[in-house]
Image (cartoon, rainbow, N blue to C red):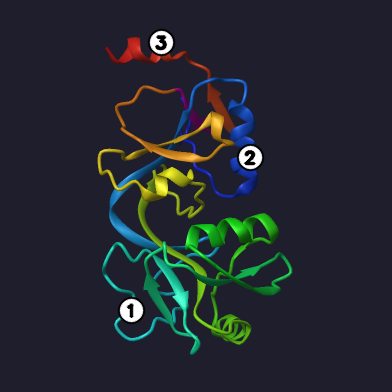
Amino acid sequence: MYTDLATVNNDDEKNSLFKTITDHSYDVYTGLYRGEVFRWHWTLPDSVYNEKTFQNWGKNQPDKNINEGCAAMDNNGKWFSDSCDTQRQFVCFNATKTYILIEQSKSWREAQEFCRTFHTDLVNVRTSSENQVVKNTAKNDVWIGLFNDPWSWSDQSNSSFRFWNSSQLSNNRRDRDCVTVMVNHTGKWNDVQCNTTQPFICHGGAFVFFSLSLKLLRNETE
């Protein structure tokens, strides 16, 4: 009836989606689901990461260990993968492309949340000149806005935007392959089992909320 389950590309769309569901009591499905292939993404949706884009990985990097799902830059400007839970300093940037070194040690997710709260995001490095600026800004190893995950959108879009609930970050259960927006957690996202019956968000030019009751959805699946 529309295009697909909703894809979220940025903060504005995330906020618009959440406003749509705040009068309802149930969490709702979006189009994000867990696939089989891990891919590297920049945090900004317009910063596409692929074999044709600028990369500056160090020797034997990135590590193929899927537990090393976040990227950092060393003091030589080379990138390396590491556990997202490692505590280190990080570089934020703002809309005027000003780079800010934050001399506080945080996990990658904590660093991203800090940058999004007080600036724009963790730094995205798309050219050799940007890489040099970040290298000059940093004093030690720092987090950058590059991460590796298996999550994909059902409409096959390339959006790298994520807004996970903190409890999801430590959840490694492989039976929770679909994603809901949590109404009672300021719109944070959570992974759930795909056979959980929930209302859902579709898109077709603009977000459209399907205000079907949970009871009706259950009846349709019985």
**Residue range of the region highlighted in magenta in the rendering:** 199-204
Residue drawn at (71%, 64%) of the image = 95
Spatial distance from mark 2 to mark 1, Cα to Cα? 36 Å
The answer to whether any part of residue 179 appears in the image is yes
What type is the residue that disc 3 sits on?
Leu
Q: Main secondary structure of the magenta part?
A: strand
Q: Quadrant of residue 39?
A: bottom left
Say which residue label 2 marks. Answer: 15
Say which residue label 1 marks. Answer: 61
Spatial distance from mark 1 to mark 3, Cα to Cα? 50 Å
- Drawn side of residue 28 relative to residue 18, left or right: left
What type is the residue that disc 1 sits on?
Gln
SS state under label 1:
loop
| Residue 203 magenta-highlighted | yes
Q: Residues within 10 Å of mark 2 (few under 14, many from 20)?
A: few
SS state under label 2:
helix
Say which residue label 3 marks. Answer: 216
Badge 2 vs badge 3, beta-carbon distance below 8 Å: no
| Residue 53 magenta-highlighted | no
Residue drawn at (65%, 69%) of the image = 93
Q: Position of residue 32 (x, y in %)?
A: 41, 42
Which image quarter is the C terminus in? top left
